Structure formats: C-alpha cells, structure tokens
C-alpha cells in the first residue's frame, strides 16, 4: 500500500527500449498526460486488455480503490489493493516482459520502500506493477516474457502492515512510483465479476471474482 515509498526507477527500460525500439512492431507510445482523478476514462470493462491478477474463480476484496482520499495512499493515483492471504498466486494481468523485480525484503518488514515487486512492460510500452510480493516469492526472471495469466509468484506483505497486492499501470518513461513524475492509468478488468462505479472503476470495499480470462 505504501508505494510512496518505492522509488522504482525503471532504468532497465532504457536498455530494453534501445534494443526493441527499431523493429516494425515498435509499440506506440501513449500520450504522456496525467489522467485526471476527477474525470477518468476507464472504458468498457468488457474490452479491457487486463484480467484480474489472481486465479480463475478466486475472489478478493478491494481494500483501497483508485484516487483515494488522504491519508490513504492512492491519492491522485489509479491503483487497486486486493486483500489476499500470504502465498496467494499472483498472475500477470496482461502479457509482458519482466523489466524489474525485487524479492529480498522480508514479509515482516513493514517499512515503506521495502516492498518486493514485479514490473511487466506491455506491447504498448505501459508498465504494470505488482507490489508486496512474498519474500523470495517471485518466480519469473528479468527479461522473461510472461503471457496473460502467467504465474508471477506469490503475494506477501513486504513493506506493508497487512498482506495484499497493490496493482497499478503506469506510462513508460517516468518514475513508476508516487513521485511527482508518476503517471498512472485508469484500468479495469474484463474478467471481474463484481460492481463497477459509474466511471467503470472498481469500488472500495467490494469483492471481485475472477472469471475465466478469455
Ligand atoms: Zn496500494
């Protein structure tokens, strides 16, 4: 939950982009604008490129939704916290390449900045973050290509007080953290059985079940 605390600079990105940047399939870069918490555009969940980051038929509660109010940590930010027990399988919400991972922090370490993390880079150059992974609980390696629904590892409680997974999507090029340069994107999930708000986002306190990610 305390991503504020995670200065995740995605330095590997520069190398990846240099290597991958001149092919005919070069990803298009989204406009580098900061979505407005007051007027986000989530789009129709039915056509979302994302699936929930947990196994089919599992259901978990959103304990913090997007753009939360102070003192909660998602202020000004599109992110979701899914409450889940230690050791829950965490799946790739969308196919991508592993561009950053960290798994050495203890699950008893509640200090901000001490979060284990996996970051995937997608075909449109956006990044998805999976925060509070279990100590030594990341199964993928740097440079791996993970299909949608692929197993990233297990959830934990590194850098937070209660086990959960923090999920968010960022534009490339900036710092994917709560720093001033962070640009997160409003996202929803096409396989989420549960209510969405009038804007299409998941709702604080509601529980969502993962349908098959077709
Ligand atoms: Zn969070």
Image: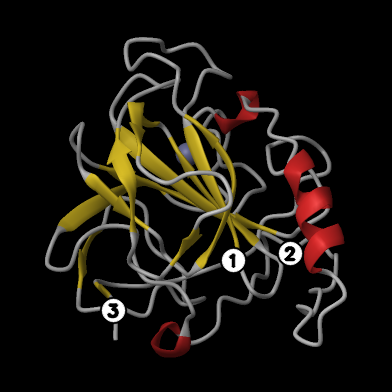
Proximity of marks 1 and 2: CB atoms separated by less than 8 Å: yes
Q: Is mark 1 within 8 Å of ligand 1?
A: no
The dot on residue 213 is: 3
* Rendered position, 4 above or below 113: below
* Rendered position, 205 above or below 1: below
- Give the percent coordinates (x, y) of residue 102: 51, 30
Name the residue tied to disc 2: 35
What colour scheme does the image use? secondary structure
Q: How far apart in space, not on screen, are marks 3 and 2 (Cα)?
A: 26 Å
Q: Nearer the viewer, mark 3 or mark 1?
A: 3
Mark 1 falls on what kind of element? loop
Closer to the chain start, of discs 1 and 2, is: 2
Closer to the chain start, of discs 3 and 1, is: 1
Q: Residue at x 20, y 42 (%)?
A: 88
On screen, residue 168 versus residue 153, left or right, reads right
Residue at the outermost left position: 57
The dot on residue 186 is: 1
Q: Nearer the viewer, mark 3 or mark 2?
A: 3
């Amino acid at each position: 939950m305390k991503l504020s605390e995670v200065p995740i600079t995605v330095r590997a990105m520069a190398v990846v982009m240099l290597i991958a940047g001149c092919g005919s399939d070069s990803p298009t870069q989204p406009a580098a604008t900061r979505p407005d918490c007051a007027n986000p555009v989530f789009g129709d969940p039915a056509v979302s490129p994302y699936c929930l980051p947990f196994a089919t038929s599992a259901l978990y509660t959103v304990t913090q939704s997007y753009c939360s109010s102070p003192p909660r940590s998602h202020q000004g930010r599109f992110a979701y916290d899914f409450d889940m027990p230690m050791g829950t399988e965490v799946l790739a919400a969308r196919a991508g390449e592993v561009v950053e991972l960290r798994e050495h922090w203890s699950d008893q370490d509640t200090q901000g900045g001490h979060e284990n993390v996996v970051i995937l880079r997608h075909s449109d150059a956006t990044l998805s973050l999976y925060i509070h992974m279990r100590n030594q609980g990341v199964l993928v390696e740097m440079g791996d290509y993970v299909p949608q629904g692929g197993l990233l590892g297990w959830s934990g409680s590194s850098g937070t007080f209660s086990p959960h997974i923090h999920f968010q999507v960022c534009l490339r090029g900036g710092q994917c953290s709560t720093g001033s340069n962070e640009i997160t994107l409003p996202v929803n999930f096409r396989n989420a059985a549960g209510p969405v708000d009038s804007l299409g986002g998941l709702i604080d306190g509601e529980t969502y079940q993962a349908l098959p990610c077709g």
